[in-house]
Amino acid sequence: MLTTRVIPTDGQAFIAGIDVVRDPARAKRYIGVVPQTNTLDRSLTVLENLEFHGRYFGMRKVEAAARAADLLAQFRLSDRAAAMPSELSGGMAQRLMIARALVHRPEIIFLDEPTSGIDPQTRLALWEILRDLHAAGQTILLTTHYMEEADALCERIAIIDNGAVLAEGTPAELKTRLGAATVVSITFAEDPAQLLDHVGALESVARVEQKDRTIRIHANSVDGQLAEVIALAARHDLHVTDASSQPPTLEAVFLSLTGRDLRE
């Protein structure tokens, strides 16, 4: 809706004070959009993709060329200026699309799952670029299914499910919703159902969940929690095959709000 591609069914949406329904053409001058799919012009070179974008937004030829050269350097693509989009790797193409969205210096840039389907090294490089952009004052609205990405990059997060905002806040604020200082996950060789009541009765345990042969324990104390539960399991002749203890994560928050069932 904010990028003007979908008309709201109710309410109003504004970009830089502009109603995106009443004046979508003017609103677009203030935004840059990087879709999930590759939308580069395949008949233009890397450099021309940037130059033409600047010209679309009213830049003079010299200004567009200078801006394109600066962005190629910033996104480490200068040596690929004469290449065609089909010659770029997935990570390079993604960097070029972000650079293209920034040519006209938008107030807000929208990124739709920018690191989906790229290798870990490229993902980290893109994270560094996005941090640099934000540090320079660029407002970024990012959608992602990678919880660690949201945790690493975002100052404020909204968790959305079935079109509704279930929670909103800083990463730290969202993690406190679990009401636990640590989350212990233990997988057993046997069904651990008989253990749930005993674990739930422990003083520091706030909540216990079971999924197949794994139990997840939300505890208010990190001291000795894992060892205590493993000892309790041994007394009930349950054999541990895997165990871990970690601070609350955004993934745990997401699952607690949306459930664990597979979606269509």
Image (cartoon, helix red, strand yellow):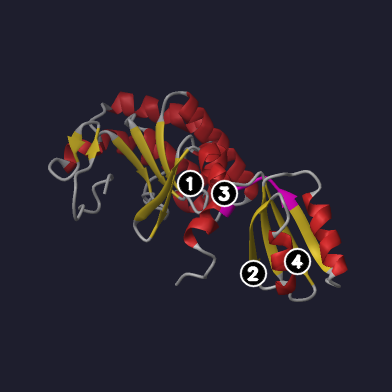
Crowding around mark 4 (Cα neighbors within 10 Å: few <14, some 14 to 19, many 20+) is many
Circle nearer the viewer, 3 or 4? 3
Distance from Cα at disc 3 to Cα at disc 2: 18 Å
Crowding around mark 3 (Cα neighbors within 10 Å: few <14, some 14 to 19, many 20+) is many
Q: Which residue is mark 4?
A: 187
Q: Earlier in the sequence, mark 3 or mark 1?
A: 1
Q: In the picture, residue 98 is in which quadrant?
A: top left
Q: Which residue is mark 3?
A: 178
Crowding around mark 1 (Cα neighbors within 10 Å: few <14, some 14 to 19, many 20+) is many
Q: Secondary structure at mark 3?
A: helix
Q: Is residue 32 magenta?
A: no
Q: What amino acid does circle 3 point to?
A: Leu
Q: Earlier in the sequence, mark 1 or mark 2?
A: 1
Q: Which residue is mark 1?
A: 94
Distance from Cα at disc 4 to Cα at disc 2: 9 Å
Direction from residue 192 to residue 18 in the image, left or right = left
Q: Residue at x 19, y 44 (%)?
A: 12
Q: In the picture, residue 15 is in which quadrant?
A: top left
Q: Residue at x 51, y 39 (%)?
A: 173
Residue 128: x, y in percent?
Answer: 57, 34
Q: For the magenta stretch, what is the residue range?
A: 245-252
Distance from Cα at disc 3 to Cα at disc 1: 35 Å
Direction from residue 190 to residue 131 in the image, left or right = left
